Image (cartoon, helix red, strand yellow):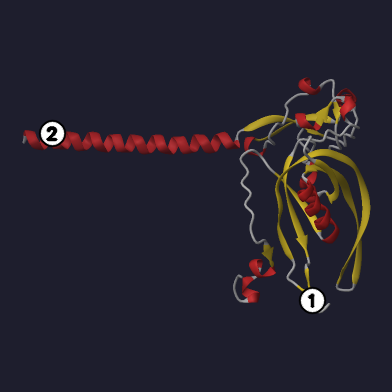
Amino acid sequence: MARRTILFCVAFVIAALGTTMVVLYVQGIDARATEGQALVEVLTATDVVKAGESVSDAESAGKFEKTRVVRDDVVEGALSSTTSIADEVALGTIYPGQQIIGQQFGSAQTVDTLTIPDDKLAVSVELTDPARVAGFVYPGSSVAIFASADPELYKADGTTQKLSPVTRLLLAQVEVIGVGDTSVSPTTTTSKGSKTTEQIPRTILTIAVTQAQAEKVIYAARNGDLSFALRTAKSKVVDGPGVTARDIMPEVFGGVR
């Protein structure tokens, strides 16, 4: 009888310990999930802040406001006040709704001065808002560059063969060293015989690259479309064969390549 009692007590303790560990594990998951969804205050733009506009002028005009956002949606480097940038000016155009980041601002002398790393060249490309991550790219940003094109194969006999349109990684990591003014250009598209003209904002971005990288960027910009993808210190970018229609519509082409 005593032995049974001891075994029963041991089993009870083990069961209680297991239950406690499960409860603590679930509580830990809940705590991590809640932490990511917690609301925090960040500074956002309520109106367009032009390149060269001082923080004090923008603040006086009511172009900044504090907004509560989910912690997981906070942009890296986002500010909650203008204290650290009070004497600086915008290095590029900032649009309504953007979170205010310290790297978007600098001294007045740096607005018209381009700092190029000693071993690099400066190359500028013109991108639409979606292609430049909707205005979240600023001087000092690290980006990956993707190219989309409709390539043609030139044969020895002088004929050409159209290849599948493709999008693929062009450069895994380059630094943006300048963001120019934004202009608006009309773009006309035709669908089912009907033409639609849209006013598309385009911005000139300048990047620091090697000669080999410059050649790739210039060629791709002249013969296709470029898109920037904003990187963080933890971003993982891997070179690959790219994506064609066959990859995203395998049911049409009878499987992937």
Q: Tell whether label 1 touches label 2 (CB within 8 Å).
A: no
Nearest the eye: 58 or 17 = 58
Residue 95 shows in the view: no
Q: Secondary structure at mark 2?
A: helix
Looking at the image, residue 247 lies above or below residue 133 = below
**What residue occupies the far front of the structure in this picture?**
156
Q: Residue at x 40, y 34 (%)?
A: 24
x then y, percent, for residue 93: 86, 37
Q: Which residue is mark 2?
A: 6
Name the mark on residue 171.
Answer: none
Nearest the eye: 5 or 201 = 201
Q: Residues within 10 Å of mark 2 (few under 14, many from 20)?
A: few
Q: Please state which amino acid type lies under the numbered disc 1.
A: Ala
Marks 2/1: CA–CA distance: 89 Å
Residue 107 shows in the view: yes
The C terminus lies in which quarter of the figure? Answer: bottom right
Looking at the image, residue 232 lies above or below residue 249 = above
Nearest the eye: 95 or 157 = 157
The N terminus lies in which quarter of the figure? Answer: top left
Q: Please state which amino acid type lies under the numbered disc 2.
A: Ile
Q: Residues within 10 Å of mark 1 (few under 14, many from 20)?
A: few
Q: Residue at x 79, y 29 (%)?
A: 65
Which is more N-terminal, label 1 or label 2?
A: 2
**What residue occupies the far left of the structure in this picture?**
1
| Residue 207 figure quarter | top right
x then y, percent, for residue 237: 63, 49
Name the mark on residue 156.
Answer: 1
In the rendered structure, the answer to whether residue 10 lies left or right of residue 192 reads left
Nearest the eye: 81 or 153 = 153
x then y, percent, for residue 198: 90, 57
